[in-house]
Image (spheres, helix red, strand yellow):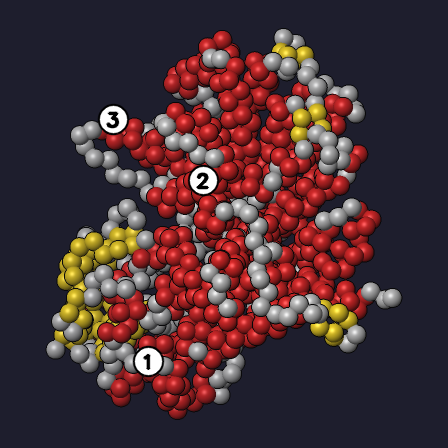
Amino acid sequence: MNVLPQLLLNGVILGALYALISVGFVLVVKGSGVINLAQGELVLLGGYVTAWLLGERGLPAVVAVPAAMLLMAAAGLVVERVVVRPLENQSMLALLMATLALATILQGLVPIIFGSEPRSIPSPFNAAPVSVAGLQVPRVNVWSMGIALAFIALVAVFFATTRYGLAMRAASDHRLAAQSLGIRIRRVNAIAWAIAGAAAAFGGFAWGSVLGVDAGLALVGIFVFPVVILGGIDSLAGVVVGGLVVGIAESLATWYVDPLVGGGFGLVAPLLLLIVVLLVRPYGLFGRHEIGRV
Amino acid sequence: MATTAVLRPQLRTSYRQERSALASRAGRTRLAVVAGLFLALPYLVGDYSLDLVNLVAVAAVASIGVNILTGYAGQLSVGHAAFAAVGAYGAVNLVGRAGLPLWAAVVVAALIAGCASLVFGLVAVRIRGLYLAIATLAAQFVIVWVLNHWEWVTGGTQVAASIPAERIGPIDTGTVQGRYYLIVGFLLICVVFAANLLRSRCGRAFVAIRDHSLAAAGSGISVFRYTLLAFFVSSCYAGLAGALFAVNAGAITPEFFPLSLSISYIAMIIIGGVGTIAGGIWGAAFVTLLPVFLRDGLPVLGIELTSELVANLQLVLFGAAILVFLVAEPGGLVQLARRLRDRVARWPYRTPAPDAYLLDGNERGSR
Amino acid sequence: MTALELDHVQASYGSLAPTLRDVSLTVADGEVVAVLGPNGAGKTTMLRAVSGLLAGERGRVTHGDLRFAGRSIRGLDPGMIVRRGIVQVLEGRQVFRHLTVEQNLLAGGHTAGSLRSARAAAREMFELFPALAALRRSKADNLSGGEQQLLAVARALMARPRLLILDEPSLGLAPIRAREIFALVARVNRERGVTILLVEQNARAALALADRAYVLEAGTVVLAGTPAELRADPRVSAAYLGVAGENAYREMDGRPIGESPTYRSPTFR
């Protein structure tokens, strides 16, 4: 049997989920100009919050997932207030380090709050796999992919058609000019972080359903970087394309290369891809130039 | 770089004086004190304390390296733990397979780590900044993966690679005292080397690039070459730290060099003081000794915590410390100490607070 | 009635020596007021102090008060100041380069409250500036310098200012484009009743446009008056208008304006 179509399909599903968590990252770049190295840890927190609401509180998914997104949006606001705002006039380097600090804090805080036992997210979907063009896929994956793409589309609509979406684009283009027109930079930052928090909650739910929720969930944050480097660090369209490429690369690498080298190549392949992209097209497929200038 | 000159101005009348490390009597006295203390310390403290000194010194070598890159050249690396791993395995293999004497193996291993870092640095230094940070993140995972899978180098995942004790003249690395002389000796060499590097043409080029790369390029400084040089030197330091770590620990596995170690190197320089050599050492001491305090100190105070909670608490404290220092005292412990000392010296007058000068406003627009 | 009033304002960056020292200045409703001065005199700092934009550069107003329509605006955040009716066109245009002309205008209308009312205002701007209407879908980055300045002014008008501040609107423009911009500023003042505060290196054009003018040197106001009074002052004509002959200039030696060390300004040399 030819496994390639199945691998590609798996890759596409993975890719959509990578795109989902990368959207939070890109939003923060676009909205507040901050490179958030803690996106994976936000996803980890989101996963635990969702697992807690679904599992321990026993809420139905239609309530639990939106509630988790709300809670995580609030967490995003807290991050903006505590980590980003005190450093608002500092260099990009200081902010990079601050998000590293945030990552470290969350790595310690999440197990203190939720304990370190792995949790599972009870799937709200029928366990029977879906058959797509003769290929078998777990139903939860298909749903996750669909909702992930819908979420990204929603964010794109927000940017294109709303007042604050436009304000965010203006602010990321030229902060001082945006301020001079009455755009409140802090509010724009806060909105960006709140949406990023919500995206992380949803990412935690989607990834947690696939992988289970434990400390390792933060590792998916690493994939954000190949995705956004490939797609361009501030481009929503780029996130989708980058996500798909990374997902497919991982899927193929895991199947074809892992047996030769003994495992774990699924993570390494996207990172090698990242290095190659940096070499030939450092600003990605859809990115702008200036962000590279720290 | 205004702060060092703000409070203790020194008149120098020639460039030679400016470059000289031992221009003042105070400088010579300090050197004598350091040398004396270095030789005498093993006779003054017990094995346990000396072992902690060794751990701090190993970390300090790495954090001085990170400081060269971050504090002076203004670039961030989150892959220095991996470069340390390269140094560690380099030393293990150079001693075990090539039969090099330990001291030489350690030096060569450091250079190997520097070269390994260039594979990633060459890709990203061209665009620097964020991209170098991301490339080093990739390096962190790729290198640790390679080490995990390259059994010829590491002996596989199941076994720890070890480095046998050796006698170097009067020094026996089988004893904590012997390791102390080796490790702290290398630390002192590192300090002197870094101080010389940073006081020279190179150091000024680094700072110029950090503060305004465009203006630096306009002054004829090759931004590419100097950024790469800073990255290489910095990675050599990490490699040396890794090699010394292997010597100190005796046996290593790739799991000793995770991403969190890279982050704790960054924590060290922020807490100690970005852009000063002393800052790297103070930060290394703080970050290395905090877990020891949490583990041994809290029970003494009557607080009993599980080791898992302590580990997590430690992460939270590190992160919080980074944030607090970034916001409140970007000059780190060194700057804090200097401020306190000046306040005491001038009491009852109040000292004007020198501006926080680091990490501030690289290449923002003109006002 | 007084629109803007600066009352003994002092401002500094970080812990450096103050950039503005004891600046007092008024702008009456409906007036055009120009501020002249050499590079480094503190003109931009003064304008940013009015708009509350100093914080991003670690600057702040340390003494004195700024009032608009009788109410203090010192310490307000920039968004609040725009909502009070003061909008600034920054030095060097600073359009949103990656947004289209239309999106630039809509961003300017952020304080209008809804995107719909911003759209209505943008339509009005396109009627006012047909040159921009033709470019509405172009990326601002691709516009010429003159077009960008036009866009920057139109974008500022989107917020319906009562006081429009312009920081060197002619900077880097060809003389003919600069004249167009000055004509536009005059029109905005006349037709829309917008009060204007203008910093300008081109003293001749600024004085032609202004009802009153101030000369700022080394962070303090050294001269003030109507354009006619300033033109008549030999020191101004020598330093800013470039009309004094060699003799007139020599004659003035030893008669500094204020305490200014920058009196022999590069403007003249």
Q: Nearer the viewer, mark 2 or mark 1?
A: 2
Q: Residue furthest right?
A: A1
Image check: A224 left or right of A269?
A: left
Residue C163 visible at all:
yes
Examine the rendering and report whether any part of residue C239 can be seen. no
The subunit letter for the residue under badge 2 reads: B
Would you name the residue on which mark 1 appears? Answer: C112
Horizontal side, residue A189 vs residue C5: left or right: right
Q: Is residue C248 left or right of residue A210?
A: left
Of circles 2 and 3, which is in front?
A: 2
Q: Which residue is mark 3?
A: B345
Q: Nearer the viewer, residue A36 or A2?
A: A2
Residue at figure coordinates x 73%, y 34% from the top left: B158
Front residue of A287 and C31: A287
Q: Residue at x 41, y 27 (%)?
A: B299
On the image, which quarter does residue A254 sit in? bottom right
Q: Secondary structure at mark 1?
A: helix
Picture coordinates of residue B318, whole percent (x, y): 45, 40
Can you tell which of label 1 and label 3 is closer to the viewer?
1
